[in-house]
Image: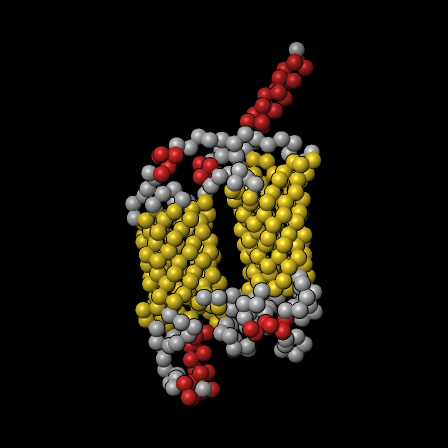
Amino acid sequence: MKLFYTGLLWLICAVCLAQDKTHTSYLDVNYFSGYVGLHNDEILHLIQEHPQGVIVSWNKKTFGYEDWEQCFGYPDLGFSLAYQNFNNSVLGNNLSVYAHYNFYFFNRNLMLRIGQGMAYNSNPYDRETNFKNVAFGSTFMSSTYAMLQYKKERIFDRFGMQAGFSLIHYSNANVKAPNNGTNTIAFNVGVTYNLDEENLEYQDTLDRKTDRKFTEPIKYNMVFRGGVNESDLIGSGQYPFYILSAYADKRINRKSAVQLGADVFFSNFLKELIKFRSVAFPEENVSGDEDYKRVGVFVGHELFINKLSLLSQVGYYVYYPFEFEGRTYIRAGLKRYFGEKWFGTLTLKSHGFRAEAVEFGVGLRL
């Protein structure tokens, strides 16, 4: 009898564990080879051989046990480790880590992966020993990669295949000059291996009509951002910057909200650049007394993915006392909610393809 109860207890535990299981996982390994795109004439001398490398990833599958998983077609979440050999002694090699999402289309045969992370470069710019490397001004930098590929799992037992194209971007976002960065465009081919014997069943419990009618009242956001950056003048020095932002957002459905707001920029590197230009280039008629502060207005979009959001904003400087890379600016990045009101942000601000700063922020949504 004691043995019977012990066996029954184990059976109950096993059933409970099976019921609690809401995800499975798999590994994929991709080899890639391609070329560095010429996005800036200053890196023309660095484009020589074809870079190549490998990306190893762990992925967690979702099956719709939470509403947001069903909204986005059961995406994967995961982490990637990438190694890239530029086949160029000036550029060196890059080792990077990412967090990523996989989104699926066309009956889950087409996968789009978007990853954001950090990279380490083995041979950054050095004034004396490596002055030709105007792409990477620092050892550590940010990196983004996108991968679009055809995918087929479990072709043989737990093994599958995938192939497609990748774009890998490296930049330190002007934390330190020089910062021309690189964009690698590559073809990749890889294998997948499922770590679980079987997949779970996809849940389809979301009321689509109710989901389309989902809305919220207008919310008001206040954000403080900061960081350090440097002008494009090599050796001009790194200075802190601060940004105060306020905006309203309106949730138009479960996935999206539109934004309208304003930024006030306190960029100390710009103060130093104004002083330098007034002395070094007198023909530009810069007095040195110009205000380094700027004020911009922007419109934006927020894509909600569980507690994480993707931000995209386009702004225009309405107060612009000193000419610096144009009056239009772009901000893109991540927003992470902690509870109902507080959030943190990690964003990149740029003027076209020229990055100005990586912004770390904290905010309140009321």
- Establish if 125 lies above or below 248: below
Evaluate whether residue 123 shows in this view.
Answer: no
Please, which residue is most extreme toward the left here? 217
Displayed quadrant of residue 307:
top left
| Scheme of image coloration | secondary structure
x, y percentage for residue 359? 46, 62
Is 65 situated above or below 132? above
Would you say 283 lies left or right of 174 here? left
Question: How many numbered badges does the structure rendering display?
Answer: 0
- Horizontal arrangement in the rendering, residue 247 relative to residue 76 (left or right): left
Asked which quadrant contains residue 4, the reply is top right
Q: Evaluate whether residue 310 shows in this view.
A: yes
**What residue lies at 38% left-to-right and 67% top-to-bottom?**
328
Percent of width and height locating residue 137: 58, 70
Residue 192, given in percent of the width and then of the height, sits at 65, 42
Quarter holding the N terminus?
top right
Q: Nearer the viewer, residue 234 or 214?
A: 214
Residue that appears at 53% across and 51% down:
114
Tell me where residue 80 appears, x and y as whole percent.
61, 50
Report the residue at 63% width, 71% height from top: 46
* 200 up-or-down from 305: above or below: above
